[in-house]
Amino acid sequence: MRFTAEDIDGHEVARREALYGPLAEAVRELVDATIRTEVDAAAVQEVEATVRAATARLRDRQIDGAFGVRYTEDGRIMPWGNVVIGLRNPIAPPLTVHRERDRCWSEFTLGAAYEGPPGHVHGGICALVLDHVLGSASSPEKPNFTGTLTLRYRRATPLGPLRAEARIDRVDGVKTYVVGALSDSDGVTVEAEGVFILPVWAREGSTTTPT
Ligand SMILES: CCCCCCCCCCCCCCCC(=O)SCCNC(=O)CCNC(=O)[C@H](O)C(C)(C)COP(=O)(O)OP(=O)(O)OC[C@H]1O[C@@H](n2cnc3c(N)ncnc32)[C@H](O)[C@@H]1OP(=O)(O)O
């Protein structure tokens, strides 16, 4: 598991955010446009060549494997490759998760890239979002892992503006039980409950390392 300390200050973090955030946002727009475009064949082929050239340019210098979770000396966490909240991950919507005591919530929009049933969010994407928001609620600072996630899809979730929220139901040793829901403007579409568990390597007194 890749947790990497970065010897950088807040200014450098902000510089990187300002550099990579707009790139990821541009690629998100490209994904949406790729799904929805109706330009002619020559234009599609021209754009394909441009995108391939851009990809090759970025690959001139890159890291091995995934981004991992990086952090600074002052405790700033940079999960920039994360599929839900990652600043550098165009697949991430991305969500901004807010916290208030034992609850978390996020308001966000899911567009064409997240479609399952026509005009509606893929069920796996609902699970992805809820897993993350429930996991975030389970602990502000501990790296809890999803043990079990149970969902009840009450009705199809339309693409568009949505809200996910979660709160701690109870804590039992290393297990935190969390409940939550995904909603549109008409109310709840998916209910969720999850058990989030502190892995052995993060438990007090543990001498094992993340694997
Ligand atoms: C990482 C930080 C980055 C920070 C960045 C910022 C982002 C901040 C927000 C993060 C939000 C993330 C939210 C998404 C989080 C994922 O997506 S995590 C990825 C998906 N989950 C996994 O891959 C987990 C894989 N499984 C495992 O690693 C281990 O099986 C587990 C779940 C940690 C359990 O560890 P274990 O050593 O097997 O646990 P063990 O000591 O045997 O059992 C402890 C207790 O849990 C119970 N238990 C064990 N397994 C389960 C289970 N699957 N279900 C229910 N109960 C169980 C046992 O019965 C036992 O209960 P008691 O006997 O104490 O009553």
Image (cartoon, rainbow, N blue to C red):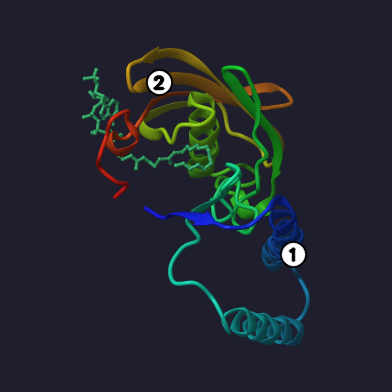
Q: Name the residue located 30 percent from the left edge and 38 percent from the top edge.
A: 201
Across and down, in percent, residue 114 comes to 60, 50
Q: Is residue 173 at all visible to an observer of this figure?
A: yes
Determine if the C-beta at disc 1 is less than 8 A from ligand 1: no
> Residue 110 in the image: x percent, y percent?
67, 45
Regarding ligand 1, which quadrant of the image does it lie in?
Answer: top left
Q: Nearer the viewer, residue 177 or 40?
A: 177
The percent position of residue 65, horizontal first and vertical second, equals 43, 67
- The CA distance from mark 2 to mark 1 is 37 Å
Amino acid, disc 1: Leu
Question: Which element carries disc 1, helix, strand or loop?
Answer: helix
Crowding at dot 1, Cα within 10 Å, few <14 / some 14-19 / many 20+, comes out as: few
Quadrant assignment, res 64: bottom left
- The correct choice, above or below, for 78 with respect to 133 in the image is below
Mark 2 lies within 8 Å of ligand 1 (Cβ measured): no
Whether tag 2 and tag 1 are in contact, CB under 8 A, the answer is no
Q: Is residue 104 above or below residue 76?
A: above
**Residue 163, x across and y down, in percent:** 67, 30
Q: Which residue is mark 1?
A: 19
Amino acid at circle 2: Thr
Query: Which tag, 2 or 1, sits closer to the chain's start?
Result: 1
- Residue 10, numbered label: none
Q: Quadrant of residue 75?
A: top right
Nearer to me, 196 or 142: 142
- State the residue at coordinates (33%, 22%): 174
Does any portion of residue 153 appear in the rendered image?
no
Decide: is 58 above or below 127. below
Q: Which mark is residue 176?
A: 2
